[in-house]
Amino acid sequence: MSAEQRRFPAGRYFCLAIMISFALTLTGCQSTLLKKVQMNEFSEELYIDAKLNFAIKHPVNWNRVKIPVSSPQFKADSVRWQIENPHKQTDNVGSMLIQSLPANNKAGLPDLLSHFLADKPELKSGQAEYFEHPAGSALKFLGRDVDRGRLTIALKGQQRDFIISLDYPNNRFDELLPVFKDSVASFSELLRADSDLQSSPK
């Protein structure tokens, strides 16, 4: 038996091989785990709109749609986000819209909701439920057609009325609904002083 063999008997070679194999396996598992964590990591950013009097947190990969003023699709009272599929960048999985309207004391939550859904007849059948949001009384409505669904919330704030609506494909409903609920929970109305309200254009 050589001196090298005496210093490293067969048993130690076996143990060393097991340790190296385990280390490589662990490295591979850590790499896969890190990829999963990065892919599923839920990071938020705060959006503040001083003109439309609201603030909301939403996932960082929800991109605000910037529509030119000259476009027929432009609405000064609305903001829209495009929700992309993180697994397939060319796939638009949905959108979130927030509409800020002058407070209408004569119109209740059902009126506010039905007016918004007037041009979406395929989504009129569904479930409606009242709830108390920190920003005010609210009515949420969940409607679906064959391919898509829409969760819409009508909210009466202290100074403004709001619509918050999520449009999504049915096959991603279970994934997007909890995220949307978190965003809705973060929604807040930005209140103006009486002097600001009096000087603001009607």
Image: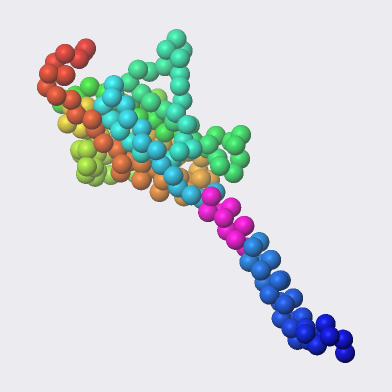
101 relative position to 119: left or right: left
Magenta range is 29-38
- Return the residue nearer the eye: 7 or 192: 7
Query: Which one is in front, 65 or 103?
Result: 65
Could you say which quadrant of the image residue 112 lies in?
A: top left
Q: Do we see residue 175 in this rendering?
A: yes
For the point 38% across and 26% down, the residue is: 79
User: Residue 144, image x and y in percent?
Assistant: 44, 40
* Residue extending farthest right: 1
Pick the front one: 8 or 118: 8
In the picture, measured across the screen, residue 174 lies left or right of residue 108, that is right
Q: Residue furthest left?
A: 194
Instruction: Name the spot of residue 109 as percent of width and height, x first.
Output: 23, 33
Is residue 34 part of the magenta span, yes or no?
A: yes
Question: Which residue sits at x=59%, y=44%?
Answer: 87
User: Is 123 rendered above or below residue 176?
Assistant: above
On the image, which quarter does residue 10 sit in?
bottom right
So how many labels did they put on this image?
0
Quadrant in which the C terminus appears: top left
| Residue 181 x/y as whole percent | 36, 45
Q: Is residue 10 above or below residue 160?
A: below
Residue at 66% from the left image edge and 61% from the top image edge: 28
- Residue 153: say if magenta: no
- Residue that extends furthest to the front in the rendered view of this protein: 3
